[in-house]
Each structure stands twice: as C-alpha cells, then as structure tokens.
Amino acid sequence: MFYSLPLRNEHSWNAYVAAFARVGDIERAKSAFDQIPEQDQISWSVLLAAQAHFGDSTLAIATFDEMRVSVAPEEACFALVLTSCSRKGKLYNGRCCFTSMRYDFGVSPSRPHYCCMIDLLARSGHLEDCEKLILTMPFEPQVLEWIALLSACSSHGDNERGARAAKSLTRFQHGAAYVLLANANIPKLTGTK
C-alpha cells in the first residue's frame, strides 16, 4: 500500500517518483506521480522514463498521450517513447510519434530520434522504409544506422539491400561493424551464390 507524504514542492515529489522508478516499482512511481499537486515537464518525463526503461511500451505510450494534453513534450520524451516502441515492435505508434514531433510540436528530430525510428523499422522488417529513412536524414548516416539495417537484412534475407548497407558500412573503421560483416550471410560479400 502507498501512503501519501506531505512533500513541500514539486522537486521533492519528482525525486520521490524517480526513487520508485529507479528500483522498478512503476506502480508506486505512478501513485506518487498522481499525488503531485502540479505535474510539470520534469514530473511527466520521470514517469515516462521509468515506464520506457522497464519496457512497458503500452503504458509509456498511454502516459505520453496523456502528457501531451497537459504539457508539451521535450525532445527526450519523444526519444523515450520511440525507444519503447522499438523494443516492443510498436511500429504504428512509433511512426505516429515520429511524425507528431515535427508537425504537432515543431520539434525537429535529432540523430537519436532517427536512430530509434531506424531501429524500429529494421526490427519490424520494413527494410525499404528503413533504408529510405537512412538516406534522407538531414545528416550523414553513421555506423549505428547502417549496422541496424545490415543486421535486419541478414535476419530477413534481403541480400541486395544488405550488400548496399555493408558497402556503406565498410567506410567506417569500427570493430563491431567488421564482426557484423563477417557474420552476415550476404552472398555478394562472401563470394557464395
């Protein structure tokens, strides 16, 4: 059972929510959050981070939707929801969140947001959309984006797209990239047919 505490200000309440969140007690974190007299951006972010971190994407998405009515989400909140969607394969929710950033809140997606969306598309097997997003980002693709695509291509048997991702990946001197390339079953790279 959760008992109300006479905390003095929102900073104390936010710390209280964070303490429960840190140990994975999402139920008590939510109960403490509900008792905050005035939930601010930090209050919402702490609760959302806890739900996203402990993998409850349905709860994180619901909290995010509720948050949007009260306060404008920050960049970090969008990243939390996108990460949560990616972990659980919630493609529709992830796409809505990614689009909403720019068009509903005027927040330009940064590299972490693109990485989350690329990971979500790759895990969901939407490899064409994933490759298009990588190639149309407003900045130069880096190792992580190509690794996500190559790994998904290997898992889903898309050798042609995988070969393109591998070719792009070879420009980087990154150990993990070479391990993935060595393990990828891409005929054009390994010389098999």
Image (cartoon, grey):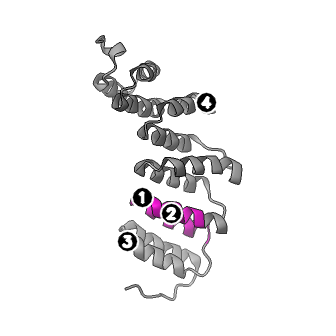
Residue occupying image coordinates x 36% and y 27%:
157
Instruction: Identify which amino acid the numbered label 1 is placed on.
Output: His
| First in sequence: mark 1 vs mark 2 | 2
Which of the two labelled residues, at mark 4 and mark 1, occupies the earlier sequence position?
Answer: 1
Mark pair 3, 2: CA separation: 13 Å
Q: How far apart are marks 1 and 3 (CA)?
A: 12 Å
In this rendering, would 17 be left or right of 11?
Answer: left
Pick whichever, 154 or 177, lies toward us: 154
Instruction: Give residue 10's position: percent from left, percent from top.
Output: 58, 77
Residue 106: tell me if it is visible: no
Q: Dot 2: what SS? A: helix
Magenta span dominant secondary structure: helix
Residue at 30%, 14% (x, y): give it: 190
Determine whether label 2 and label 4 are within 8 Å by CB.
Answer: no
Q: Mark 1 points at which residue?
A: 53
Q: Residue 142 or 60: which is nearer the viewer?
A: 60
Q: How many C-alpha atoms fall within 10 Å of the one at disc 2: few (<14), some, or many (≥20)?
A: many
Circles 3 and 4, Cβ within 8 Å, touching? The answer is no
Disc 4 residue type (three-letter): Thr
Is 1 rendered above or below residue 151?
Answer: below
Q: How far apart are marks 2 and 4 (CA)?
A: 29 Å
Residue 109 in picture, x, y percent from top left:
62, 44
Label 3: which secondary element: loop
- How far apart in space, not on screen, are marks 1 and 2 (Cα)? 8 Å
What residue sits right under mark 4 in the picture? 136
Magenta residues (range): 40-66
Return the residue at label 3. 25
Q: In this view, does 181 lie above or below 101?
A: above
Residue 48: mark in rendering = 2
Mark 3 or 4 closer to N-term?
3
Q: Does the magenta stretch include residue 57?
A: yes
Q: Does the magenta stretch include residue 107?
A: no
